[in-house]
Image (cartoon, helix red, strand yellow):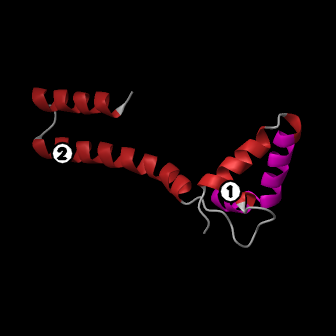
């Protein structure tokens, strides 16, 4: 179910008289605030991604991703190395992040 379906059900209940104006307004606000709060952590993680100035070997990508995800930077270095050795995509992802992620 999405927010539009929930809002239409609330409006239907309000129209049938099952919800008063005040109950409808509270339920609608709770629904909309809950959806905004659920989407907010993802946006903060994406907007908070910065290349590290202190924890860096080459471009600071692994240090920045480590700070954003909570994992140690050596784990991310290992992940990028394995991706590079196995598929060659690790270097491409690392270069794209180096280009598009701003420095702190």
Q: Badge 1 is on which residue?
A: 65
Q: How many residues crowd around disc 1 within 10 Å: few (fewer than 14), some, or many (20 or more)?
A: many
Residue at (85%, 47%) from the top-left corner? Answer: 81
> 43 left or right of 23?
right
Residue 102 in picture, x, y percent from top left: 59, 61
Decide: is 22 above or below 64: above
> In this view, which residue lies farthest toward the bottom?
54
Label 2, secondary structure: give it.
helix
Q: Is residue 97 above or below residue 5?
A: below
Residue at 30 percent of width and 27 percent of height: 5
Is residue 81 on the magenta stretch? yes
Identify the residue at image location x=18%, y=41%.
24
Q: Is residue 11 magenta?
A: no
Q: Which mark is residue 25?
A: 2
Question: Is 68 left or right of 12, judged from the image as shown?
Answer: right
Which of the 4 image quarters holds residue 61? bottom right
Where residue 4 sits in the image (x, y, percent)? 29, 31
Coordinates of residue 41 in the picture (x, y in percent): 50, 53
Q: Which residues are magenta?
A: 63-84
Q: Nearer the viewer, residue 77 or 23?
A: 77
Sequence order check, earlier mark of 1 and 2: 2
Q: Secondary structure at mark 1?
A: helix
Residue under the image location 85 percent in, 50 percent down: 78
């Amino acid at each position: 179910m999405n927010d539009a379906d929930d809002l239409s059900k609330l409006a239907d209940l309000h129209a049938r008289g099952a919800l008063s104006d005040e109950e409808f307004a509270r339920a609608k606000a709770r629904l909309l605030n809950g959806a905004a709060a659920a989407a907010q952590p993802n946006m903060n993680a994406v907007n908070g991604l910065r290349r590290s100035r202190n924890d860096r070997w080459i471009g600071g990508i692994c240090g920045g991703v480590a700070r954003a995800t909570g994992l140690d930077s050596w784990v991310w270095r290992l992940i990028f190395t394995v991706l590079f050795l196995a598929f060659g995509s690790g270097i491409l992802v690392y270069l794209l992040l180096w280009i598009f992620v701003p420095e702190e």
